[in-house]
Image (cartoon, rainbow, N blue to C red):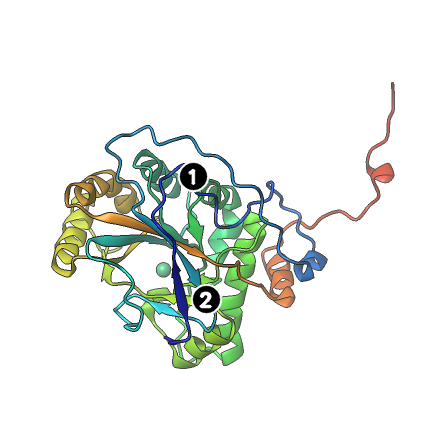
Amino acid sequence: MRIAASLIFASAVSLGVTGAAWSQTPATKSMAPAAAAAPAPAAAPAVAKAPCANPDALGIGRVVEIDTTGGPGFGFEHFKQLDFLRDKEIVLTFDDGPWPLNTPSVLKTLAEECTTGVFFPIGKHATYYPEVLKQVAAAGHTIGSHTWSHATLTNKKLTEDQRKEEIEKGFSAVKWALGASPSPFFRFPALQHPPEMVTYLGTRNVAMFSCDLDSFDFKARNPQQVIDVTMKKLDKLGKGIILMHDFHKHTAEALPALLRKLKAGGYKVVQMKAKAPVETIARYDEEVLKDAKLPTVSSRPVSSVVQTISE
Ligand SMILES: [Zn+2]
């Protein structure tokens, strides 16, 4: 969306030597509102991953780091300035999770193929299933946000404040679930882009993701349709950011065969990482805790919680 956005291309790296784009702190359900103003957790040392056990895996062809200053836009369906993918390069993206069974199934397939994707979880879903979202992070995938409740932000009934709240609470909810800030990567529900929110995200230094091709997996009647639609569009375009949904059963079921076809077709997965995590706004961090009735940390001193009764 903005030319000021710069892309820094890292050289291709093999799986096993890359660290996570951002750290994941130990599982916690107890982020106190006061913690919102605290700086983002420092990056943890890169966790050495097991080498890829599948010699014929799809793998990761290239890793790119995105400077989200000014809110760059990706995906030619809406943003045409940043044409960074080379021929036969693809980015796998997954919306609407985290969700039981389907998201873990997608993770299993990605792990088997030693490859990766960008996940755009719904804030409310993140509060329902934080453990599932933590699995996404633990596997090293990039995580952004897809609003708090999947409201269509072009809906004229929403005020500007309500639209901003949808965006901000989405990020705050993902941060709560992970115990660490996600990437400043955002996808508008239904790919509906109200111009004033595109401008707003620019001021927040959040990158926006449309897509180059929509798998239409949410319309598919079976897994084969997901594969057929995706491959047909991809073979026509030759590259692109692919929109899928880890929320959907057909997508989870289609993914093993789809990734095999991508490999056979000579496609290479590009991993997109953010240069820095998103900075959430304390007020929305607090609203997530309040609205979702999430547990907050106890402020009682340890001596009032734990007492030795026999030794
Ligand atoms: Zn969605």
Q: Please, is residue 36 above or below residue 205 in the view?
A: above
Q: Which quadrant is home to the C terminus?
A: top right
Instruction: Judge from the rendering whether residue 246 lies leftward or rightward of residue 236; answer left or right.
Output: right
Q: Secondary structure at mark 2?
A: loop
- Left or right of 267, for residue 103: right
The x, y position of residue 286, in whole percent, is: 65, 62
Disc 1 is placed on an element classified as: loop
Question: For the N terminus, which image quadrant?
Answer: bottom left
Find disc 1 in the rendering and name its residue: 17
Which quadrant would residue 172 be assigned to in this image? bottom right
Q: Is residue 264 visible?
A: yes
Ligand 1 neighbours mark 2 (CB distance < 8 Å): no
Which of marks 2 and 1 precedes in the sequence? Answer: 1
Q: Which mark is residue 37?
A: none
The residue type indicated by label 1 comes to Val
**What amino acid is labelled 2 in the image?**
Thr
Crowd class of label 1 (few under 14; some 14 to 19; many from 20; radius 10 Å): few
Q: Nearer the viewer, residue 47 or 75?
A: 47
Q: Position of residue 120 (x, y in %)?
A: 41, 56
Q: Please give the residue where the numbered disc 2 appears in the rendered image.
A: 68
